[in-house]
Image (cartoon, rainbow, N blue to C red):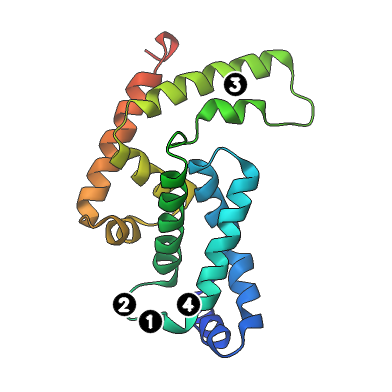
Amino acid sequence: MALVEEQALIAQAKAEPSAFAAIYDHYFPRVFSYIRYHVRDAEAADDITAQIFEKALIKIKGYRPERAPFADWLFAIARNAVTDHLRSRMRYRWLPLDALRDQASDAPQPEDVAIRNETLDRLRTAVSSLSDREREIIALKFAARLTNRSISRLCGLTESNVAVILYRAIGRLRIELCTEEDL
């Protein structure tokens, strides 16, 4: 969605709440993906995502584009919602990647499933070795598809610091996931 089009939709949504539907349709996949990265239960992720958009709809009149882009504002709400959810259920701090292992698919071949499970196990182990800050930044970058600038504003870091953290974390993941065949 173009910035001008987004700003026009936001202005419409401030005056007429039904115009918020286009904003919802545009941002839903990114917000849900971000929430799903952190929350194990798909139903809980649905509920949290709904709460985020409800809160955004209620507070949209207070949104000021000169303070931050809309995506930053929306993901700040999402980040707070995830934090609240995780605090209420401390035993689920991060979505274990092996929870994704059991997702239904059309017709996976047993060999493909075995390879996928092994890869997910290795990825889960590698990601768990990262710090909380690194995992959060990776979630914002790849699950929420935010820019480094947006991540820097959300996390209170400089844009270059975000880039360095991402570079180093991905480098560590790459080293841990490298197989003997890759060498």
Classify 20 as above or below 132. Answer: below
Q: Residues within 10 Å of mark 1 (few under 14, many from 20)?
A: few
Say which element carries label 3: helix
Q: Which image quarter holds the N terminus?
A: bottom right
For marks 3 and 1 on the same chain, the one whose residue lies earlier in the sequence = 1
Mark 1: which amino acid?
Arg
Q: Which mark is residue 64?
A: 1
Reading the image, the residue beneath label 2 is 67
Reading the image, the residue beneath label 3 is 116
Report the Cα–Cα distance between label 2 and label 3.
Answer: 43 Å
Q: Nearer the viewer, mark 1 or mark 4?
A: 4
Q: Which of 120 and 57 lies nearest the eye of the viewer? A: 57
Q: Which of 182 and 8 lies nearest the eye of the viewer? A: 8
Identity of the residue furthest to the right in this view: 107
Asked which quadrant contains residue 72, the reply is bottom left
The reply to whether the C-beta atoms of the residues labelled 1 and 2 are less than 8 Å apart is yes
Q: Which mark is residue 59?
A: 4
Mark 4: which amino acid?
Lys
Q: Residues within 10 Å of mark 4 (few under 14, many from 20)?
A: few
For marks 3 and 4 on the same chain, the one whose residue lies earlier in the sequence = 4
Asked which quadrant contains residue 153, the reply is bottom left
Q: Nearer the viewer, mark 3 or mark 1?
A: 1
Report the Cα–Cα distance between label 2 and label 4.
Answer: 15 Å
Q: Name the residue at 31% across, 38% down.
A: 132
Report the Cα–Cα distance between label 3 and label 4.
Answer: 42 Å
Is 7 left or right of 43, judged from the image as shown? left
Residue 84: image location, x then y, percent: 43, 52
Report the Cα–Cα distance between label 1 and label 4.
Answer: 11 Å
Q: Name the residue at 21% across, 52% down.
A: 160
